[in-house]
Image (cartoon, coloured by chain):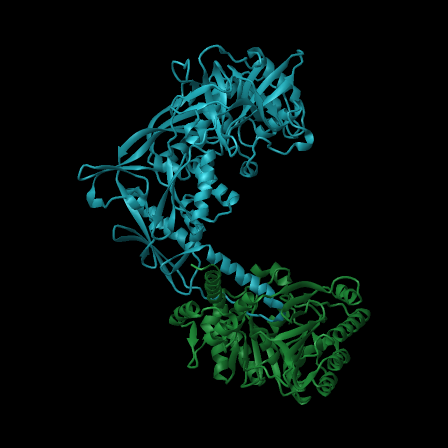
Chain colours: A cyan, B green
Amino acid sequence: MTDLSHIRNFSIIAHIDHGKSTLADRLLEECNAIEKREMEEQILDSMDLERERGITIKATAATLNYKADDGETYALNLIDTPGHVDFNYEVSRSLAACEGAVLVVDASQGVEAQTLANTFLATDAGLEVLPVINKIDLPSARPAEVKAEIEDIICIPAEDAPEISAKNGINIHAVLEMIVNGIPAPEGDRNAPLQALIFDSQYDSYRGVIVYTRIKQGTVRPGMDVKMMATGAVYKVVEVGTMSPKGLIPRDALGAGEVGYITASIKTISDTQVGDTITGVENPAAEPLPGYRPVQPMVYSGIYPADGAKYQDLRDALEKLKLNDASFVYEPESSIALGFGFRCGFLGLLHMEIIQERLEREYNLDLITTAPNVVYRVTKQNGETIMVDNPLDYPDPMEIELAEEPYVKVNLMAPQEYVGNIMDLATNRRGEFKDMVYLDANRVELHYDMPLNEIIYDFFDALKSRTRGYGSLDYELIGYRPSRLVKLDILLNGDIVDALSFILFADNAYPRARKICEKLKENIPRAQFEIPVQAAIGGKIIARETIKAVRKDVLAKCYGGDITRKKKLLEKQKEGKKRMRTFGTVSVPSEAFMAVLKLDED
Amino acid sequence: MPFITTRKNKTPLGIYVHVPFCRSKCQYCDFYSLTAKDDKLMDGYLNAIIAHIKESGALAPAYKVDTIYFGGGTPSFFGADGLATILSAIRRNFDVDYNAEITFEANPDSVSDTLLKRLKAEGFNRVSLGIQCADDEILKKIGRPHNYQQAVSAVQRIRKAGFKNLSVDLIYGLPGQTMVGWRETLESVLNLNPEHISCYGLKVEEGTPLYEYKDFCSLPSDDTQADMYLAACEMLRSYGFRQYEISNFARKGLYSRHNMKYWTGGEYLGFGPNASSDFAGKRFTIVRDLQGYIQGIRGNGEVLQEIDEIPLRERAGEYLMLRLRTMSGISRAEYEKAYLLPFDDIEASLEKSRSFGHAVKTDDGRWHLTPKGFLISNTIISDLLLIQDRSVQLQRFGK
């Protein structure tokens, strides 16, 4: 075990694109954790999706052995964190595993929204935040001003912040020295009862679940019986060790202050919840570490195979994804329009998009996703209370005594010049203003109570666009409140398409119905006949659009030399139709379902 | 197959010769052609194509050539000598039916009396004249090297030379063209009394000059193009023309026998750069590059750029895609017998099209599309292809 004084646990935080993952790459290189020739960009982001979107979805960690200028060798544990409000809880647990954070700020962009939001998450967790100025080699770099900004806006000293270029490997050494000298060594008693914080887990088909953990107190060794304090699951530890980008390195024991992994032949990932505390069965800790919250999906939607024959494939794929993602839940459901599929629960809309994209890419599935919804609470006239996570289960209005929807407390943060825009946005989304606090001369925090339903669609995007990217957002569930809800049905050529039905606030029904009809009109291809698109509440039609019949779709010339090309064209057209679902007489492409989800590009 | 005659049990074969030379390039054209008048290159082309014909003739002893088509480019611009030389090479190396249909494409600016007389004597018996439009302003705009008066006089000379089978190519949906203008073109051309008329909706192809300024040259809308098409179908019908394919109209019996092969699964061999063949179960296309073709024939490099072996199941798709371009259409008997696939669901879909006035079932049980149906034939055919796909899957894997 490494002596506590020679351990540093840190994460890197930054606004998107300020160079977080690139700096991580350089640190790994500098400490020879990875050979140059094995280097690929964003090495800690192992999913293609992460590299492509330039985001980190799953937390990962690596131990770097760094020989510092003082001649000592330190174990630097870098914990990479996801960076989206959907994963705020996961981020907070990753940060809770650290004593410090390296804050990367772009030398030309300066302080931005996520710089603030992430810094606050880190300081809230009691972390020492150390700024570095990145992209110093860009012509537009203005390090001195940016340092002043950091001191003014975030109120942390930045005078000595290293000026670096992660991309070109300039001054990386200074960052490492800063980590060693600036971040406190962890504390803890290696003889105390075990308290290990789970900050992530991952499924491996040979070893079962690999739990990523930070030992806060005590020591864990192979052979020891351990218990997950929140879920109560008990396992015998098989292996412990540390992580490197090249793989897992087994060790004899992990002691307080260290970051590493534990395997224990764990079959079900839901036994190892992020934020839970692992303790010993013998000599258990008196209480778990603070901050644990059970996973609670916020958003539900139906996922169906575009080709009904692929149901089994979809089920297998969901099972495999679930192995790696304890926060994702699903159960089978069926729809008249779409056949057999699954009702899935997600942490938020990004989480939903990620799961969907992974299903499509990694498992090569074509999917149809229904509009996401929150969980409604309905009390019926007969006194029975039901939780509705599927619009199809929404009771007849006549049977409803009381309908309630979940509310969240929303914290919005932005420079003060955007306060007007934010207020407009929040009011439009049924936000109930609570208060406004000036954090400093420039920055403001606003508090609202708001229906969760209003933020799951695209609130984050809307906020970003109305604050030129400076706004940030956090929310937490505060309970259910009575609401006037209606179920909106969509009819194509006179037939209800059940998969397009959804529940919404009554006052929003008209505008939303109109928009949905417009979107469907744009996305459903013309057919040989005219197709009416209607929206209805109960039996009453409240909006209508018409998709005109196709008039001209012909290849005028088709002689010897044209046949191959035109055949391909028709094949393509046919393949497009293959991916469509037929409802009665109307074929609907899966994009139409997606388009309905993205209504708010005003 | 009512359109193709066989003699002595030999398989009928069409021959297409691509002549890639033009006086100038039209703004909308994406065919392979060269505009430089380069005698050396033309000689190279002639030698290559004759060598190619010689080599291929040996491979087709069991075929009888009943149609020959010289397209381009502008065959008439290439000149009578060249065309005659190629035709006699074909006659020397293939078994050409005495009654073969032999067509050459011509532009009004390159049909001299001498040329016509010579080609008639060589055995050419059909002329396809590219008139495109009767409005001189539009002709100029789209880069045609002639005006309408030249087209009128070309027709007179073609008749004088003794050609009894004349086809005229027209385009609708041209820049600045109106419905009234299009009707005037049709009327003018009908006055010339051709035996055959092809009417093509203008398609703006990427890579053509027109593509660059398509948004600034007042192209008629899709709706107008559709109206123009329906107007042409109606007008030509009233003048006694039979529509036998989406874009082709002919006096009784005078349809293009060569072109009909493309739509009815006939075999054909193509010569010259970018020419395509469907021969012995394979579909292949020659490189789109004259130098490459000449070199390839000499044994330096590839002659073909694309070879597809077409399996029976793809032929089943082609049957629907190509036959439904024609007025003779498709039938249950042909389909089930040739491809061993069920026709029921295809018929059900066609029934639906019929209810919208897009398809017709004739008394002898054949299905064909109506002019309105032709206009949206991609929509209809891709539906049928999807149905066919599903029936193949079902046959292969069961329910």
Q: Pinpoint residue B291: horizontal percent, then vertical percent.
A: 77, 64
Q: Nearer the viewer, residue B113 or B367?
A: B367
Residue A58 visible in the picture? yes
Question: Residue extending furthest right?
Answer: B40
Drawn side of residue A64 relative to residue A231, left or right: right
Decide: is A475 above or below B148. above
Q: Residue at x 48, y 60 (%)?
A: B393
Q: Quadrant of residue B5?
A: bottom right
Q: Pinpoint residue B377: horizontal percent, then vertical percent.
A: 49, 68
Decide: is A32 above or below A387. above
Q: Pinpoint residue A497: horizontal percent, then vertical percent.
A: 34, 53
Q: Residue at x 49, y 34 (%)?
A: A468
Q: Nearer the viewer, residue B13 or B131?
A: B13
Question: Residue extending furthest left?
Answer: A382
Q: Pinpoint residue B147: horizontal percent, then vertical percent.
A: 64, 76
Q: Nearer the viewer, residue A190 or A456?
A: A190
Q: Quadrant of the N terminus of chain A?
A: top right
Residue A442 visible in the picture? no
Decide: is A49 above or below B224. above
The number of numbered discs placed on residues in the rendered structure image is: 0
Q: Quadrant of residue B209?
A: bottom right
Q: Nearer the viewer, residue B139 or B4?
A: B4
Q: Quadrant of the C terminus of chain A?
A: top left
Q: Quadrant of residue B128?
A: bottom right
